[in-house]
Image (spheres, rainbow, N blue to C red):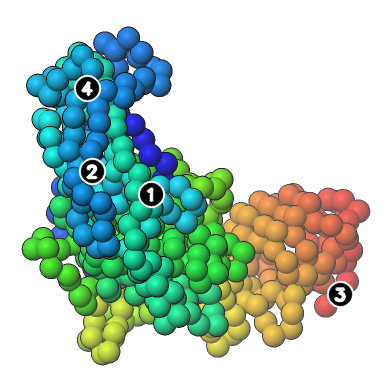
């Protein structure tokens, strides 16, 4: 991340404290998961603080002669190294105020340590701010050899600003790169997806969140703790070394990553998959995968836009093929209800409603259930859950005795609506609609790739744009059909053959256009 001067540090380093959420994350406009209550309360406090500080900054900017322009920094401060930087040691600096100012005029002092990173820039490692002047500052302990810079900013009471820095080299062993190589070697497997997951799991199992909000560098994998900046920088280095395309993404004082798998981009937030500790001790056994490979729609539920992509143009993240629950098939274990220890999965619920003759079904359950090692687990039916279920239903045939069930699904913050679209039979391109179907809904098979449609006896109507812009060439129409929308097949390329002896369908084919042929069954 590029360094930012002046009061802009406020927004960048007001880091959101996060705790682990059992189950799936919730949107804030619905009943709050008790396990995330503390996190949400912390978020609200930090947001209020940011608004307060931003308002103060705006007032100062307005009064400043260079308002709304880049600040002009006066180099009226000096750093003197107390001793030469040594490997793994702490180094101190004496700070002096030069020129027309003196120490009593300092209203705020900001200290930052940076190390040269993978992009040949200096990345933030350590930072703190005090509302007074310190004549002596000391950096954190160096965890690895390399080039560093210590920077000090001074805010003076007359509205001017002072700055000084010291660039130096810590000699010794590059332990950070050694550790990166060691971890990648242990986690790298044939599959990029498995490798990315292994690196994610290694990171959240070997480091923990720094509640003091002091350490921001990728050296957190050596230190053992850090904030979101450190998680995202370390995961960036790990993925990059493993040959996986990766970027860092930031917004609102928070940082995470985007990775490319099989030609699609996904968001990964290692910080929020790692449980927060209050007693400054690592927490194990509660790490999660909620934020492994999300698309932007689901990420934005609790990561408000706009997202800033570091060192790269923003790329589209729309897919969920690599999402942890989709890729592993976990979503297929989820169910809206259970009884006597048995869970009825969403797949089973879909089939149950279908065989009851329903063509559209909406579920608005408060909870989801799944089984792990014979134990019933409970999670919240929140918007992220609904989105994953809808994605799974839209992108996978459900197995059934009659063939692969085709459907379309949409979701809201608390519900999933499923439209049954028929069966994909063994004969490629043939779509046989459910025997219980009484009508083909509007837009039900819009742009379907099936070339042969079998409409069941008992179906009475075909709705608006039901097969519009599709690949349909042959339609079996029973005598029960008495209504076909004029645009039911609009946009379909080529002529369509109706196989029927239904007088209504025959008359429809003759009167609507010349694109229809009729043959007896």
Label located before the other in sequence (3 or 1): 1
Secondary structure found at label 3: loop
Q: Which residue is mark 2?
A: 81
Label located before the other in sequence (4 or 3): 4
Q: Is 493 displayed left or right of 155 in the figure?
A: right
Binning the other alpha carbons within 10 Å of mark 3 as few (below 14), some (14 to 19) or many (20 upward) gives: few
Secondary structure found at label 2: strand
> CA–CA distance between discs 4 and 2?
16 Å
Q: Which residue is mark 4?
A: 98
Q: Is residue 362 above or below residue 341?
A: above
Circle 1/circle 4 CB separation < 8 Å: no
Label located before the other in sequence (2 or 3): 2
> Residue 200: which disc?
none
Circle 4/circle 2 CB separation < 8 Å: no
Please give the name of the residue rendered at 36% of the width and 68% of the height, measured from the top-left corner.
173
Q: Which residue is mark 1?
A: 123
Q: Is residue 213 above or below residue 332?
A: above
Label located before the other in sequence (1 or 4): 4
> CA–CA distance between discs 1 and 4?
28 Å
The answer to which image quadrant residue 111 occupies is top left
Which of label 2 and label 1 is nearer to you?
2
């Amino acid at each position: 991340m590029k360094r930012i001067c002046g009061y802009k540090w406020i927004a960048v380093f007001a880091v959101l404290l996060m705790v682990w959420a059992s189950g799936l994350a919730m949107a804030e406009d619905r009943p709050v998961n008790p396990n995330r209550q503390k996190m949400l309360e912390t978020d609200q406090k930090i947001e209020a603080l940011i608004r307060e500080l931003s308002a103060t900054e705006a007032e100062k900017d307005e009064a400043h002669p260079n308002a709304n322009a880049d600040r002009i920094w006066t180099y009226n401060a000096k750093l003197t190294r107390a001793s030469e930087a040594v490997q793994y040691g702490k180094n101190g600096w004496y700070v002096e105020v030069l020129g027309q100012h003196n120490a009593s005029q300092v209203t705020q002092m900001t200290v930052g340590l940076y190390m040269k990173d993978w992009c040949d820039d200096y990345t933030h490692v350590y930072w703190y701010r005090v509302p007074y002047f310190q004549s002596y500052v000391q950096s954190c302990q160096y965890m690895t050899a390399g080039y560093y810079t210590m920077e000090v900013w001074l805010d003076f009471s007359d509205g001017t600003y002072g700055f000084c820095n010291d660039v130096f080299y810590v000699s010794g062993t590059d332990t950070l790169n050694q550790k990166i190589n060691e971890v990648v070697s242990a986690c790298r497997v044939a599959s990029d997806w498995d490798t990315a997951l292994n690196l994610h799991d290694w990171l959240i199992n070997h480091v923990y969140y720094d509640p003091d909000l002091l350490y921001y560098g990728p050296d957190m994998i050596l230190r053992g703790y850090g904030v979101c900046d450190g998680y995202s920088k370390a995961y960036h280095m790990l993925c990059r070394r493993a040959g996986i395309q990766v970027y860092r993404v930031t917004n609102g004082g928070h940082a995470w990553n985007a990775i490319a798998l099989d030609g699609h981009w996904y968001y990964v937030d290692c910080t929020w998959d790692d449980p927060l500790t209050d007693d400054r001790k690592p927490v194990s056994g509660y790490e999660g995968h909620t934020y492994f490979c999300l698309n932007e729609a689901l990420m934005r539920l609790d990561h408000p836009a706009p997202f800033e992509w570091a060192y790269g143009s923003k790329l589209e993240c729309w897919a969920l093929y690599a999402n942890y629950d989709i890729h592993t098939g976990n979503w297929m274990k989820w169910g809206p209800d259970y009884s006597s220890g048995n869970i009825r999965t969403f797949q089973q619920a879909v089939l149950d409603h279908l065989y009851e003759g329903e063509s559209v079904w909406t579920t608005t359950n408060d909870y989801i259930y799944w089984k792990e090692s014979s134990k019933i687990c409970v999670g919240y039916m929140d918007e992220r859950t609904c989105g994953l279920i809808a994605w799974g239903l839209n992108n996978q045939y459900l197995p059934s005795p009659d063939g692969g069930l085709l459907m379309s699904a949409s979701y809201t913050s608390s519900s999933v609506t499923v439209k049954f679209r028929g069966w994909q039979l063994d004969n490629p391109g043939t779509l046989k609609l459910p025997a219980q179907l009484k009508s083909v809904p509007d837009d039900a098979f819009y742009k379907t790739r099936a070339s042969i449609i079998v409409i069941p006896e008992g179906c009475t109507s075909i709705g608006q744009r039901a097969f519009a812009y599709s690949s349909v060439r042959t339609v079996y129409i029973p005598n029960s059909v008495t209504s076909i929308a004029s645009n039911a097949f609009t946009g379909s390329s080529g002529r369509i053959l109706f196989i029927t002896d239904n007088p209504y369908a025959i008359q429809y084919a003759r009167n609507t256009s010349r694109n229809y042929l009729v043959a007896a069954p």
